[in-house]
Image (cartoon, rainbow, N blue to C red):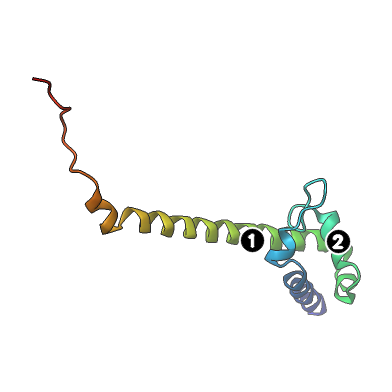
Amino acid sequence: MLQERCAHEFRALLAEVLTSEAASQETEDGKTLLNSWSTAKRRLKSDPRYNKVPRKEREALWRRYAEDMVRRQKSAHDSREEKHTDAKGRNPLESSKLPPESGRSHERR
């Protein structure tokens, strides 16, 4: 039970530290809080909740959290892109400006 509570508190710590904004900041070598455990660990270590979780579980909990966050960001990005495409494709003003398409090219006389 204590271990579950510690894991829950660690996930809360991850949610506080690994925000979308913080995760979007890259180091000089392209690492972020979501793709580099060592980078994330440096930000997490100062919090007491970090030390309450057994060492062998920290990285696994971080990895699951990071993968979920990346998946959610990708899903949100795909949804925005899809809405943008739908809006462009269904604009009645745009479609009225285009000439009707015919299957034949212009014939010369």
Say above or below: 23 vs 4: above
Residue 51: % across, % down: 90, 71
Task: Identify residue for label 2.
Answer: 41
Q: Residue furthest front?
A: 109
Residue 68 image label = 1
Q: Amino acid at mark 2?
A: Lys
Looking at marks 2 and 1 on the same chain, the residue that comes earlier in the sequence is marked by 2
Say above or below: 19 vs 105: below
Residue 88: % across, % down: 36, 55
In the picture provided, is 88 more to the left or to the right than 61? left
Foreground: 98 or 7? Answer: 98
Q: Residue at x 74, y 64 (%)?
A: 22
In the picture provided, is 89 more to the left or to the right than 4? left
Q: Quadrant of residue 25?
A: bottom right
Say above or below: 15 vs 24: below
Q: Residue furthest top?
A: 109
Residue 3: % across, % down: 81, 75
The quadrant of the rendering that contains the N terminus is: bottom right
> Do the CB atoms of the residues marked 2 and 1 lie less than 8 Å apart?
no
Q: Secondary structure at mark 2?
A: helix
Q: Quadrant of residue 57?
A: bottom right
Say above or below: 61 vs 35: below
Q: Amino acid at mark 1?
A: Asp
Q: Residue at x 71, y 67 (%)?
A: 19
In the picture provided, is 78 more to the left or to the right than 22? left
What is the crowding at mark 1: few (fewer than 14 residues within 10 Å), some, or many (at least 20)? few
What is the crowding at mark 2: few (fewer than 14 residues within 10 Å), some, or many (at least 20)? some
Residue 73: % across, % down: 60, 60
Q: Secondary structure at mark 1?
A: helix
